[in-house]
């Protein structure tokens, strides 16, 4: 799975917002706290507002606030707001793909990939990440030493 810069920056800004003791946090504070590019963050915050994840407030006391409590916003919610569906195959949902011949069962693999992403991303909220309370599923996956090893293929530079 490719995690876009958009999703990564959105998570970092929202986690900063979730961890803040202030009701509202200015965009510049979110940007500075995580070293995010200004213009890109503004676009992401607009998408998060449209996606119902944050509220924006104008004026001297303005800034951003979470649209609902941090324990009610999953990482899947955030990723969907900025990147769309968690898993797509050539722009199609996995269940809408069809294959023939030797690839006949590939659809089942893509559906399972989406299900595994949901298992992780829908089980963790912003509040969980801020508090370091990650689900048992995540703890189990992280406890496998192979999870921490890159499996770069031959055309990639090792690293």
Image (cartoon, rainbow, N blue to C red):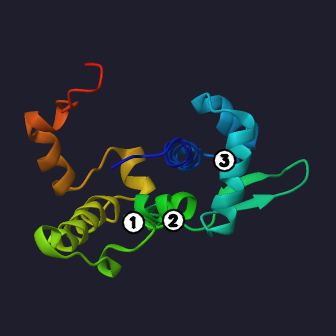
SS for callout 3: loop
Image coordinates for residue 41, horizontal then vertical, percent: 68, 43
Read off the residue under disc 2: 84
SS for callout 2: loop
Instruction: Determine the residue positioned at 72% across, 57% down.
Output: 46
Question: 67 left or right of 127?
Answer: right
Question: 71 left or right of 148?
Answer: right
For label 3, count other residues whose C-alpha is less than 10 Å away and answer few (under 14), some (14-19) or many (20+).
Answer: few
Nearer to us: label 3 or label 2 = 2
Quarter that holds the C terminus: top left
Q: In the rendered view, tell whether residue 21 sits above or below residue 28.
A: below
Image coordinates for residue 155, horizontal then vertical, percent: 27, 27
Instruction: Determine the residue positioned at 47% across, 65% down.
Output: 77
Query: Are dots 2 and 1 in contact, CB under 8 Å?
Result: yes
The residue closer to the viewer here, 85 or 125, is 85
Q: Is residue 23 visible?
A: no
The residue closer to the viewer here, 77 or 159, is 159
Read off the residue under disc 1: 88
First in sequence, mark 1 or 3: give its number: 3
Instruction: Determine the residue positioned at 39% across, 66% down.
Output: 88
The residue closer to the viewer here, 28 or 149, is 149
CA–CA distance between discs 2 and 1? 9 Å
Question: 142 left or right of 62?
Answer: left
Read off the residue under disc 3: 22
Nearer to us: label 1 or label 3 = 1
Total residue callouts: 3
Query: Are dots 3 and 2 in contact, CB under 8 Å?
Result: no
Extreme-front residue of the structure: 101
């Amino acid at each position: 799975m490719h995690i876009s810069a958009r999703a990564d920056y959105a998570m970092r800004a929202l986690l900063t917002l979730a961890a803040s003791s202030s009701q509202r946090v200015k965009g510049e504070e979110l940007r500075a706290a995580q070293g995010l590019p200004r213009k890109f963050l503004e676009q992401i915050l607009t998408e998060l507002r449209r996606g119902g994840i944050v509220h924006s407030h104008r004026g001297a006391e303005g800034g951003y606030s979470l649209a609902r409590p941090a324990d009610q916003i999953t990482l899947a919610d955030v990723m969907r707001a900025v990147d769309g569906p968690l898993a797509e195959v050539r722009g199609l949902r996995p269940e809408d793909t069809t294959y023939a011949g030797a690839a006949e069962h590939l659809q089942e693999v893509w559906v399972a990939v989406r299900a595994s992403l949901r298992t992780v991303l829908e089980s963790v909220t912003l509040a969980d990440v801020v508090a370091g309370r990650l689900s048992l599923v995540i703890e189990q996956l992280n406890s496998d030493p192979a999870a921490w090893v890159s499996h770069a293929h031959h055309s990639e530079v090792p690293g």
